[in-house]
Amino acid sequence: MIAMTVVALVTAAAGMATSAHLYRQRGAADRTATSRQLAALAVNLAANRPRESMLLAAAAWRAAPTVEARGALLSTQAQQFVGAMDGPGPLRDVAINPTGDQIAAAVSDGTVSVWDLRTRRPAFPPLHGHLEQVNAVAYSPDGRLIASASHDESIRVWDARTGAPVGKPLGEPLTQGFAQDLGIQMELGLRHGATLDVAFSPDSTMVAGAQQNGDVVLWNVRTGAEVGSLSVPGLLPTGQEAFHTVAFNRAGTVLATGGGDNAVRLWRVSDRRQIGGPLTGHRGPVRTVEFSPDGTRLASAGDDEKALLWDTRTRRVIGSPMVTYGGDATTDVEFSPDGKYLAGSTQEKKIYLWDVGTQQVMAPPLAGHRDVAMGIAYAARGDLVVSAALDGGIMLWEPVRTISPDTQPVFGMAMQPHGTLLATAGASAAVNLFDVAARKTAGAALTGHRGAVYAVAFSPDGTLLASGGQDGTVRIWDVAGRRQRGPDLVGHRGPVRTVAFRPDGAQLVSGGDDGTIRVWETASGAAVNEPIFTGGDQYHEAAPTVTRARFSADGQTVVTAAYDTPADEGVQFWNMRTFEAVRKPLRDYRGAIFDIAVSPDGGELVTVGRDQMVRRWDMAARTSVGPALGGHTDTILAAVYRKDGRTLVTSGLDTTMRIWSLGDPGDVPVTITGMHGWASAVAVSDDGKWIATAVGGQPRGWRLYLWDTDEAAVLDRLCRTIRTDFTEDETRQYLDAVDFARVC
């Protein structure tokens, strides 16, 4: 029965009542309806249930290749979720071994669970030995051992390869009889209380355990002997949790602790003496501390809904607190291997990533757990974060699923014709090149501009690259040699905002803040003409900024766009024989124009801008072609044709990208979501397989996203990445309407 509409399904999903039961349907029309409903659910659940969202998108595409299903499937490429594993019960901590192929988790049932990350299956049966819940786990830096800390007061050490216990428990573990009398024994000073955290020394020879009674005890791993302890007398009344967390610095010379008195303390390992006074700044218990890989910084976090970054030399807070949305208490933190990022798990089930340099959250937080997220761990490669929660789930995340870690604004980009390179222009004063196929940078950046670079364009044969920037110059680069070819092209009296090659590559046009366009010979760099004044016959302060200049397919006309001009002058046409304006402006367009695109055959022009509409124009007649295309809900910033001329890609402030199949009935676009910011620039490969977007407006800065438009490849990669399928209950809930048993 398809009485339940997409609107009803989305409303139900938004309220987490996703018990939509779709009865078995047959026939193309029914499968199309089901596909659209599943796609709507996939989009709605993307932010908080990534696993289900990705599987729903795959199911929608398998049900029927609708426009909605294609959008949902392609949008999964923005997900940072890459897999999950189920534990035997509530999980309280997680750790990754140094080689990144094994994880261990602390389980509330008193066991330690270990998984092989390559197969995502248990490496061996749960490790039994503790009598109470396990609170923390840690790998030795040499990867050979696992240490676990428990409420039974002991630390146990395990062989990471076999799971066998190593030696006797460190400390005097409770017996079944004593467990019930723990509180009384602590009051009498007979017991240390639960061991809440454990950490290995960098040389793997020693472990430190944070005890509930306020002691931190150091043990020799090989002999099992107690090396010493440290404490603050009278810190808290007996029986309260004085120390929650402990961590060694990289050199093994300093130990950091955090506890119930809201303070962080540093200790010399050699004599177990406190270094200076407590580090104060938190307004609640400190649950977690972690040294940066180089030891120069210390992160601390806890119940006061913020993480602090300390300079270990000056003992002062660095920058601003790293806060969570909605006041989430932080349960665990860990630095990325390069020290650039800090990951944190929170009481409100979310995973946060902060940029250490700016102390800004790399929004939005990662959601998917259904109970308190208790532990976080970074793989040594830096490309994987693992989280564990009281819901018994392990979730795997790729912290940054983009091709560029640069946080500088990106103003323009271009794909290399007949090649695999992507060029970007941005605030970093350089032109950056990326290998699309390899999804990584392609050699050194092209430097020389003095200030931001605003525009880039490849020559039609892909051998040259033009750039224009804040310094008012145009530069031509030899792509293969990665060097500038010839002198700077000078003449503009302000920043250059746009560059474009003529279709035969013989000439180059540029425009900018001085209100002029200039045409240059590509081979010699010589100016072909005097500057063309788009806003009059001379320079003046109110000259319109030329934001786009594009050649017609025959090279005889240049079309320019400016968004700070009178309504009838925003788009102008210039005869390249006479260098004069063609006095036949576009009719019936509205609002400021932010981008233009000329179809590969030269027959049509597309304009996009503040009116949120995609408008197509006949280049010769200057009249509109069909009705304006609606779909975007905010200003459209970029538009680009695919080389075949049948596909157009647009993006804007509504944080979506839309792929239009021009000429299809209804012109319904494929909508790509999940970028979490506005896409200021778009580039498309010749074959249309790859689309790149520059996304800004995010707390974490700007990122470059690369989208594969091959649905089969995306579906295959999705299934190989998450390595999971719907459970039996989920299959009954979502897939009764289709006649396939498995999605992946």
Image (cartoon, helix red, strand yellow):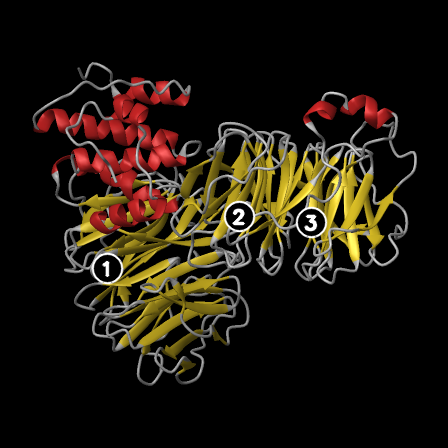
Q: Which comes before the other along the chain, label 2 or label 1?
A: 2
Going by the numbered disc 3, the residue's amino acid type is: Ala
**Which is more toward the observer, 79 or 716?**
716
Q: Position of residue 314 (x, y in %)?
A: 83, 56
Q: How crowded is the residue under tag 2: few (<14 C-alpha within 10 Å), some, or many (20+)?
A: many
**Which of pointers 1 and 3 indicates the residue nearer the eye?**
3
- Give the residue type that dot 2 points to: Gly
The N terminus lies in which quarter of the figure?
A: top left
Residue shown at the point (31%, 79%) measured from the top left: 522
Q: Residues within 10 Å of mark 3 (few under 14, many from 20)?
A: many
What distance separates the C-alpha of mark 3 from that of mark 2? 19 Å
Dot 1 amino acid type: Val
Residue at 35% of width from left, 73% of height from top?
465
Q: In this orientation, which residue lies closer to the viewer: 404 or 455?
A: 404
Q: Which mark is residue 375?
A: none
Query: Which mark identifies residue 199?
Result: 3
Coordinates of residue 527 in the picture (x, y in percent): 35, 79
Whether residue 117 is visible: yes
Which of the numbered marks, if any, corresponds to residue 582? Answer: 1
Task: Answer with left or right where residue 215 lies relative to residue 734.
Answer: right
Q: Around disc 1, counting alpha carbons within 10 Å, would you say few (fewer than 14), some (14 to 19), or many (20 or more)?
A: some
Could you tell me which residue is drawn at 52 percent across and 61 percent down?
A: 427
The reply to whether residue 657 is in sight is no
Q: Which mark is residue 163?
A: 2
